[in-house]
Image (tube, rainbow, N blue to C red):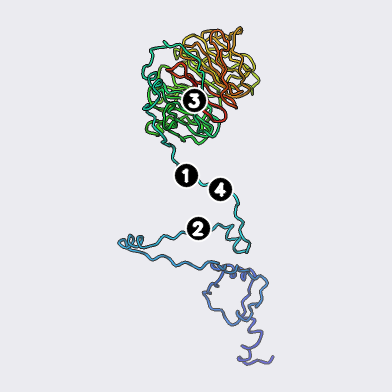
Amino acid sequence: MTKLPSKLLQNSPAFAAAKIPTFCPMDLLCNAYSNTSDDEPEPDSKPKTKAESEFQPKNPIFTPSKRPRPEYPYPPTNPHPVLRQNQRYSALQNEAPVAVRYVSKRERALLSSGIPEVLDPKPSPEPNVPVASTQVLGSFFNSDPRHDIFSSLRHQPKGHAQQSRIPGRLSTALCHHTKAVKAINWSPSHAHLLASAGMDHQICIWNVWSRDQKLARIFSFHNAAVNDVKWSPQQLFVLSCGYDCSSRLVDVEKGIEIQNFREEQAVRVIKFHPENSNLFLSGGSKGSLRLWDVRTGKVAHEYNRSMGPILDVDFTISGKQFVSSSDVSGTNMSENSIIVWDVLREVPLSNQVYVEAYTCPCIRHHPLDPYFVGQSNGNYIAIFSSTPPFRLDKYKRYESHGVYGFPIKCDFSLDGEKLVSGSSDGSIYFYNSRSSKLERKIKAYEQACIDIAFHPIMPNVVASCSWNGDVSVFE
């Protein structure tokens, strides 16, 4: 065999093949994916030999796909310079405020795609802006009434000495409410003031016999329709309730809300306790009855039973019991329509008082005798005994007016000799409470007459309100 020179032997393919290391495809993949960055290759710790660079394939089969560098549409922002402690306050003072609107992802996508954004034609309403809840329009002091009115209010009779008389003419028309008026109430301590509660969310305080401005105050503390309003027996406060699930106590003279009694139901009726003016009863749309303490703002007693929405409540003469009326028409049961309750024990004394298939939107107890009446949707006023066994008088009722689903109310005079009722035909009906005979009918409104109230001092004065928002005083 011929011996080749050493220089030729080093340049021969066999010699080069002897020095070539073997490579595996998995090694190539590991080297490709072992980089910590997708943009820059990881530097090799060992320099590659000439043989490795020659035999490394130029177009490998397993080529890793690298993600392209994202192109940001916004230029990078420069970081804020670091200020020293003594430079921060001066920089905040010199820096002008810049109003920047937040751009959502949806708006950025629409801007980048070139599609114009369609604005909502009905934008969402602004959040609740605090408005004035009290409007002072006139004086509520009894400064300039007529001479006969001033004399009657100044010389208040003791007890129930004066005999009630039926008014014969319209004395004052009070117009402000824009919707139906649900309730009216005379002030027992300031007898020239009348409060009215309307479906327009307002409470109006009227100085009825003022010669200048009869509308003294407008309270707008409720943000829903107001169902009932009552004067405090001793102080110049009014208590009101409504569909905003609250009962609110307001100082009339200062025009501020003193307390807000929140509930989880729309409050339909309120009534002060006859013996303790710090307690009042509330009834709501979920059938819950609560006795509140004004001093603590908490519930003193709660009366629970399977009842419908509470329509009206009234205390007995002693204040130890009260009568509630509820709407049970949805249950197809006549029981629990009128219930007599024990105030302290929180238990019903009778729930079989009224078994006819009608609801009673109004309950009124006689001021002297042990019986109460219920305004029935059967277009009559029923009479019930307020002593056990709380029976219905089947031989006497007041039936000349109409109810027809309206929340028509009624009221007794101070001596209990007269019973007055509103009507769906807009008239006022005066009955003799003992004989139940109709004595007079007065056409007052074109729409339904809702509430009616005798004056607490003058026996010949009656106030009324209508479904169209009018308030009237008859003498």
Specify which label sits upstream in the sequence, 1 or 4: 4
Who comes first in sequence, dot 2 or dot 4? 2
Q: In terms of image quadrants, where is residue 233?
A: top left
* Residue kind at label 2, given as amino acid type: Arg
Label disc, if present, on residue 184 of the rendered structure = 3
Q: Earlier in the sequence, mark 2 or mark 3?
A: 2
Dots 1, 4 in contact, CB < 8 A: no
Q: Residues within 10 Å of mark 3 (few under 14, many from 20)?
A: many
Of badges 2 and 4, the one in the foreground is: 4
Instruction: Give the quarter of the figure containing the N terminus.
Output: bottom right
Q: CA distance from mark 2 to mark 1?
A: 22 Å
Q: Position of residue 113 (x, y in %)?
A: 63, 63
Amino acid identity at mark 4: Ser
Q: Which residue is mark 1?
A: 129
Callout 1 amino acid:
Val
Q: Secondary structure at mark 2?
A: loop
Locate residue 253: give its quadrant: top left
Q: Nearer the viewer, residue 359 or 473?
A: 473
Q: Is residue 442 visible?
A: yes
Numbered label attached to residue 101: 2
Mark 2, Cα crowd under 10 Å, few <14 / some 14-19 / many 20+, is: few
How far from the left and from the top, in percent, is residue 219? 45, 34
20 up-or-down from 198: above or below = below
Q: Secondary structure at mark 4?
A: loop
Of circles 2 and 3, which is in front? 3
Mark 3 lies on a secondary structure that is strand
Residue designated by label 4: 124
Dot placed on the residue nearer the N-terminal end, 1 or 3: 1
